[in-house]
């Protein structure tokens, strides 16, 4: 009887027809909005994960304050910190005058009940979902069942009342969001806040986004007064680069729609016996193993007896295969003990026979390199019928590489360059 009544309520639609794009509420923090796909979407749920101490609470307090200052009603509910602690942080961030509704609470019933007082709330922040608990579930706070139940109730409230919900989620040692994996399935957007404790910058990365692209990143710098946006990440990632050192090459990369230049560093050392070490930070170790094999087999570089260390400087994690050429250049440079040309950037994917393959957005990469003062770019050689020659700013010379052996030539020519310029460094 009941099911029959339900069945009549279901309506079916075609794919045609116009659904307007979801409305957006910009947080006014540009780097944040970029990752969200243009701002917060009403009646949606966002999960922000990250290591303890990375800056999640700081980021969300700054975003909440910015929205509050823009005239939107924002509720910030913390289960981890007292009101005093949050106020202290606000003092440090210079945000004490922002209109916000703060609460320290963990009991879900109380929290859901309090929403009735603010039917016009645009954003509700829950810091963190692991501290929330509900009477209805008979297990400890932080347990999988509690986290799932609390998230379910909060998301339902967001959908029915129309506010954007941001949940802070803790990350386990293994790097996955603690609690149920199912949390990632329940929300519309999953963001990871990453960074290396030794470095001041932080990266907000989209992992899942039902309303936008997931390959965008937002770059921030943790300062004494909170997170500052980094509008030009390339300059930041290259800031500590020293010229004239072997084993370093600049990769002209792409993070979402934005070109980002990073330094790739390689170090080879004689293996002291046993299996040679392969240590990688910021890149895929399987990919490194493949490149080493290709360098050995196709170019005769003898690396099997060396320990190999590879590092993406500054703590960025690079996932693009386009980084192959820069990694290879760094390895060749380390093996030959010759610095790569300090004015050159590298990009291109490498195949198993040692051939260079085209990658997307060559023009954007080269333009960014020109902007930062580089004068040449090693890029994959175009094949007949392949993609058109990228239109390159006059300040940059394109060095087309067809095969890894050509790259060995280009990198090793640094020896001649050094002799010619009378430079005895390196
Ligand atoms: P926090 O936002 O509390 O991290 P999370 O919520 O992810 O655990 O930030 C923690 C660190 O950030 C803390 O170690 C101190 C540092 N910090 C600054 O360097 N500057 C600041 O202005 C603030 C608020 C924090
Ligand atoms: Mg916190």
Image (spheres, grey):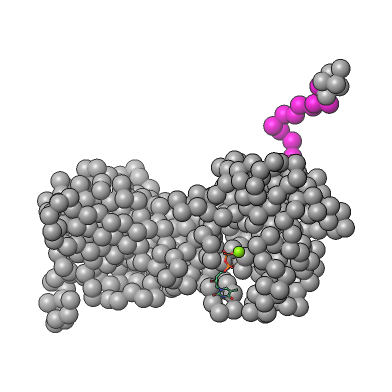
Task: Evaluate whether residue 113 shows in this view.
Answer: yes
Q: Foreground: 178 or 335?
A: 178
In the rendered image, residue 354 lying in the magenta stretch gets the answer no
* Chief SS of the magenta region: loop
- Identify the residue at image location x=16%, y=68%: 337
- Identify the residue at image location x=65%, y=50%: 141
Picture layout, residue 178 above or below residue 413 = above
Residue 278 % position (x, y): 25, 54
Task: Evaluate whether residue 23 shows in this view.
Answer: no
In the rendered image, residue 13 lying in the magenta stretch gets the answer yes
The answer to whether residue 8 is left or right of residue 201 is: right
Image quadrant of ligand 2 equals bottom right
Magenta region = 7-24
Residue 190 % position (x, y): 59, 50
Picture layout, residue 86 above or below residue 258 = below
The answer to whether residue 301 is left or right of residue 75 is: left
Q: Report how many numbered discs are placed on residues in the image.
A: 0
Q: Foreground: 294 or 343?
A: 294
- Identify the residue at image location x=73%, y=70%: 83
Q: Look at the image and tell me in which quarter the C terminus lies.
A: bottom left
Q: Foreground: 264 or 61?
A: 61
Q: Quadrant of residue 73?
A: bottom right
Residue 171 % position (x, y): 53, 54
Picture layout, residue 138 above or below residue 227 = above
Residue 121 % position (x, y): 81, 58
Picture layout, residue 250 above or below residue 153 = below
């Amino acid at each position: 009887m009941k099911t029959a009544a339900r069945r009549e309520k279901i309506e079916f639609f075609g794919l045609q027809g116009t659904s307007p794009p979801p409305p957006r509420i910009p947080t006014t923090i540009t780097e944040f909005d970029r990752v969200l796909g243009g701002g917060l979407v009403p009646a949606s749920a966002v999960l922000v994960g990250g290591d303890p101490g990375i800056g999640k609470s700081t980021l969300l307090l700054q975003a909440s304050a910015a929205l509050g200052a823009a005239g939107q009603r924002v509720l910030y509910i913390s289960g981890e910190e007292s009101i005093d602690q949050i106020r202290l942080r606000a003092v440090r961030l210079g945000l004490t005058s922002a209109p916000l509704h703060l609460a320290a609470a963990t009991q879900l019933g109380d929290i859901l009940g309090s929403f009735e007082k603010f039917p016009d709330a645009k954003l509700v922040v829950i810091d963190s979902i692991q501290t929330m608990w509900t009477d209805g579930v008979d297990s400890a706070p932080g347990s999988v069942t509690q986290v799932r139940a609390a998230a379910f109730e909060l998301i339902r409230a967001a959908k029915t009342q129309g506010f954007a919900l941001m949940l802070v989620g803790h990350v386990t040692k293994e790097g996955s969001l603690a609690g149920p994996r199912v949390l990632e399935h329940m929300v519309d957007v999953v963001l990871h806040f990453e960074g290396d404790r030794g470095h001041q910058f932080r990266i907000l990365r989209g992992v899942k986004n039902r309303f936008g692209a997931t390959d965008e990143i937002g770059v921030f710098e943790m300062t004494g007064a909170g997170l500052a946006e980094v509008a030009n990440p390339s300059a930041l990632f290259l800031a500590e680069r020293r010229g004239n050192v072997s084993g370093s090459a600049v990769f002209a990369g792409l993070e979402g729609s934005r070109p980002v230049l990073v330094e790739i560093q390689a170090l080879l050392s004689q293996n002291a016996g046993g299996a040679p070490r392969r240590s990688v930070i910021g890149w895929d170790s399987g990919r490194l193993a493949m490149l080493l094999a290709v360098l050995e087999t196709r170019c005769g570089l003898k690396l099997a007896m060396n320990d190999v260390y590879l590092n993406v400087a500054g703590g960025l994690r690079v996932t693009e295969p386009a980084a192959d050429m820069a990694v290879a250049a760094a390895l060749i440079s380390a093996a030959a003990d010759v610095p790569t040309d300090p004015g050159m950037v590298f990009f291109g994917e490498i195949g198993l026979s040692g051939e260079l393959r085209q990658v997307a957005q060559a023009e954007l990469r080269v333009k960014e390199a020109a902007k930062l003062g580089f004068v040449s770019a090693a890029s994959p050689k175009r094949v007949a019928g392949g993609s058109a020659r990228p239109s390159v700013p006059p300040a940059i010379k394109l060095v087309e590489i067809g095969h890894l052996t050509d790259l060995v030539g280009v990198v090793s020519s640094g020896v001649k360059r050094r002799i010619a310029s009378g430079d005895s460094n390196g």
